[in-house]
Image: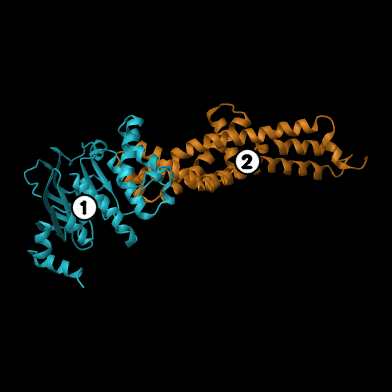
Chain colours: A orange, B cyan
Amino acid sequence: MQNLGINVLFEGTTLQRLFEGLMMTAGIAFISIIIGSFLGIGMGLLRTSKSRIVQFICRLYLEVFRIIPILVWLFIVYFGVTNALDIHLDGEVVAVIVFSLWGAAEMGDIVRGALESLPKHQVESGKAIGLSFWGLYRYVLIPQAVRRMLPGAINLSTRMVKTTSLVVMIGVIDVVKVGQQIIERSIIKVPTASFWVYGLIFILYFIICYPLSKLSKKLEAKWEN
Amino acid sequence: MNKENHQVLLEIKDLHKEYDTRTVLDGIHLRVHKGEVIVVLGPSGCGKSTLLRCLNGLESIQGGDIQFDGESLVGSNVDWQKTRQKIGMVFQNYDLFPHMTVIENILLGPIKVQKREKKEVMEQAAQLLEKVGLSDRKDSYPRQLSGGQKQRIAIVRALCMNPEIMLFDEVTAALDPEMVREVLDVILGLAKQGMTMMIVTHEMGFAQAVADRILFIDEGRVCEISEPKEFFTNPKTERAQQFLNIFQF
């Protein structure tokens, strides 16, 4: 058994540390997805507004997040904003802020697309039975939009989970960083350490993301009936 | 069938509607009495549907006045939410909410908008469904229904709000011919019960059977208002004659 590199995973607290790193990754992603989704629904409603100014601002917001790489956003907030405002923010907090804002921008676009794809007569028949603006959204439009936006929203969520690997760059110890530390420690004794550690990380990401796409399939099937 | 002595429920005075620079309605006058059935006829694009849509605020108007139940429906302080509960409307497209069952579709307005008791609305809904022969489809989703069934449910949904007037905007135009009858029968039944209605349709036989008066519109103007018998046998205007000729082979 001496030569089997897989043992590197079971030495000391390796597994526990990787798990802690995974929780950091999943935690940042999960919180950001929740915040981003709520902000995104608001964003999507704003983007269907008739006001040109509101439309322009929302559009600008989305494009700014699309054009500038997330890594740069992390740097801007972690180094730039904290410096300019003379405050200290932990890497984790910065990560949640950036990922939530990014999620809101992209989710807003998905919500807008879903709302706009609904037939116009749904709005009219909702109005015709006397529904208020909010009633119309709450009972008629949003429930239908949610069904349509699900594939896009799940896709965005898995992208957010994957992109959290960038937080290493602002000093957050996520699962990838823990993996690197373990590899560096064991590489001389176990030359195949990177294969096993990254292999496990691969499986861990899969374990987080797979249930998400499974969930979306299930919901789609449920709403189909 | 003279209902001219009844109370005036809806009065349209010199109604003007424009899209950008194109005039769609050019000075419409009409009085609808309680219990009266007005069928609106006219060539495509003459403004029939727009007229109905102006009556429940789905289109803004550029001039004139609409009085409903003694209150004006013109201006920015009209409480459309309240008014629309009294003006039921059924559209050409099957406009049921696809994510709700039949009964949920029917209950949404009465319970969420009118804040009525669920038990009482359920009873009314059951009666109405019985009347249109769809009691057994209460828990179906719209996509499990035929076009004719969907339209009958849409009518029930509007009726369950206890409206004072019903507007029908070409409700059979998108239907398979075999299903037109079942929907028209429901509307005929409503007319017999004394429901006030304005109906836009292309079914001439039905128009003649259901109408108290025919309103013939062309190019946004009222060309003729007359009783159906007179309109179909002896139209006063040349334009109406031409229109009727299209329907004769």
Where residue A32 sits, quadrant-wise, is top right
**Camera-nearest residue between B59 and B88:** B88
What chain does badge 1 belong to?
B
**Camera-nearest residue between B177 and A118:** B177
Residue B63 in picture, x, y percent from top left: 14, 48
Q: Amino acid at mark 1?
A: Ile
Q: Which mark is residue A161?
A: 2
What chain does badge 2 belong to?
A
SS at circle 2: helix
Residue A22 in picture, x, y percent from top left: 70, 35
Q: Which one is in front in this view, the residue at disc 1 or the one at disc 2? A: 1
Local crowd at mark 2 within 10 Å, few (<14), some, or many (≥20)?
many
- Residue under circle 1? B199
Q: Is residue B125 visible?
A: yes
Residue at coordinates 22% horizontally, 55% vertically from top-left? B200
Residue at coordinates 93% horizontally, 40% vertically from top-left? A2
Specify the farthest residue to the bottom.
B249
Name above or below for residue A165 compared with residue B246.
above
SS at circle 1: strand
